Image (cartoon, rainbow, N blue to C red):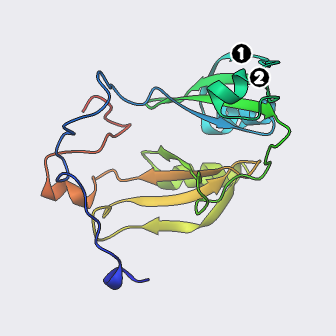
Amino acid sequence: MTAANAPEVTVSSKPGTPPSTGIPGLRGTEHIGFTVPDLDQATAFFVDVIGCEYMFELGPFVADDDWMATHLNVHPRTVMRRLRFFRCKHGPNFEIFQYEAPDQDLSPPKNSDVGGHHLAFYVDDFDAAVAYLSAKGVQLLGKPTVRTAGPNAGQTWIYFLSPWGMQFELVSYPNGKGYEKDTTSRLWHPANPAA
């Protein structure tokens, strides 16, 4: 399907219009949680390569009843070996888990899979960040993509992988994005978190 014959998308409000309903008292994203196969390897990657700050560790957690299934939607005999919290500059905290479960899938989802995801990090100097990751031996996916038209005009991005195959993205748009010329509303920006 091409963009020319793609179905029209209907949204409930105009871009930039504050939602009329939602969770009372919502302030923003406090943390993002994800599971890794080796918590020590993930810690080294997030601290030594990405530059996050390790905060604390919890665990293990295990239950003999259905607590894990009821509260976490996982197999009842799942063991949460350890979890660690990290802060990474201006953005949500990360809660990183190491689980063991009888029905555990050890393959990271692709972006096209249901539940597929990636973490995107904003950088001020895109070329320096790409060179840094390359020097650290991080697997970059393709060459940088430069957007010159549309709502993301002015943005440059590239995907990269963690040692265990989790998907990440570097993104930069130091002069703003194309959509900004049509509205006074702005997406949240980690380089200007108060705006």
Q: CA distance from mark 1 to mark 2?
A: 6 Å
Please count the marks in the image.
2
Q: Which quarter shows the N terminus?
A: bottom left
Q: Position of residue 109 (x, y in %)?
A: 67, 55
Q: Amino acid at mark 2?
A: Arg
Q: Classify residue 77 as left or right of residue 176.
A: right
Q: Classify residue 175 as left or right of residue 169.
A: left
Q: Position of residue 116 (x, y in %)?
A: 59, 54
Instruction: Determine the residue positioned at 33% across, 75% down.
Output: 7
Q: Position of residue 188 (x, y in %)?
A: 32, 40
Q: Classify residue 164 as left or right of residue 84.
A: right
Q: Which quarter shows the C terminus?
A: top left
Instruction: Determine the residue positioned at 78% across, 48% down.
Output: 105
Q: Amino acid at mark 1?
A: Leu
Q: Which residue is mark 2?
A: 82
Q: Which residue is mark 1?
A: 58
Decide which of tag 1 and tag 2 comes sooner along the chain: 1
**Closer to us: 14 or 103:** 103
Instruction: Determine the residue positioned at 59% across, 59% down.
Output: 111
Q: Image quarter for residue 23?
A: top left
Q: Secondary structure at mark 2?
A: strand
Q: Position of residue 153 (x, y in %)?
A: 30, 64
Q: Image quarter for residue 80?
A: top right
